Image: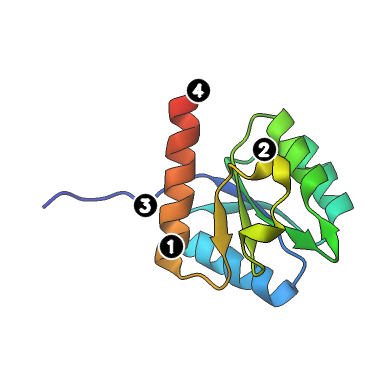
Amino acid sequence: MTATHPPSGSVFLVEDEVMIRMMIADMVEELGYTIAAEAGDVDEATKLAQCIWFDIAILDINVKGRMITPVAAAIKARNRPFIFVTGYGATGLPDEYRDHTVLHKPFQLETLAHTISATIRSYRSEQ
C-alpha cells in the first residue's frame, strides 16, 4: 500500500457571500491547502492579487454586482493560475476568460479537489 501525501499550497479566495467564502475556505483547508488571503470585494481583491503570494486563486465571477475581471487581470499579469466559481453558469464568464476553468456552485469537496489539482497540473506543464 502506497502512502499518499495531502496536497500543499496556498489559495487566494475571492467571494462576496461570507457564508459561502467560509464554506469554501473550510473545504480548501480540508484538502490540505492554506488560505493565503480572502477578499469580499473587487477593490480589496485587486490590491491583494498584486502583492500576496499564492499558488492558485479561486474567484467568484460576480462580486457584489461587479465582474471579477480586474482581479483576474492582476492575477494573469503575475502568471498565477486561477479558477472561476459561479452560480450563474458559464454564460457569466467574461469573454477574455472563456478558456479558464469554471466551477459551478454548489460543488462537492471531490469536485473542488479535482479542479484545483487539474488546474495546478496544467499550469505547471505550461511553465
> Residue at left 71%, top 59%?
92
Mark 4 Cα-neighbour bin, 10 Å: few <14, some 14–19, many ≥20: few
Q: Which residue appears at 74% of the width and 73% of the height?
A: 18
* Image vertical order of residue 104 relative to residue 82, above or below: below
Please name the residue that numbered disc 2 is placed on: 53
* Mark sitting earlier along the chain (2/3): 3
Q: Earlier in the sequence, mark 1 or mark 4?
A: 1
According to the picture, the residue beneath numbered tag 1 turns out to be 111
Q: Which mark is on residue 6?
A: 3
| Local secondary structure at mark 4 | loop
Q: Which residue lies furthest to the right in this view?
A: 43
Q: Which amino acid does label 2 sit on?
A: Trp
Say whether disc 4 or disc 3 marks the residue closer to the N-terminus.
3
Q: Position of residue 52 (x, y in %)?
A: 73, 39
Task: State the residue at coordinates (21%, 50%).
Answer: 3
Query: Label 3 near label 4: C-beta < 8 Å?
Result: no
- Compared across the picture, whether 16 is left or right of 123 comes to right
Q: Do the residues labelled 1 and 4 touch (CB within 8 Å)?
A: no
Identify the mark nearer the N-term, 3 or 1: 3
Identify the residue at the far top of this view: 127
Q: Position of residue 4 (x, y in %)?
A: 26, 50
Q: Distance between the residues labelled 1 and 2?
A: 24 Å
The kind of residue tagged 3 is Pro
Mark 2 neighbour class, 10 Å CA radius: few under 14, some 14 to 19, many 20 or more: some
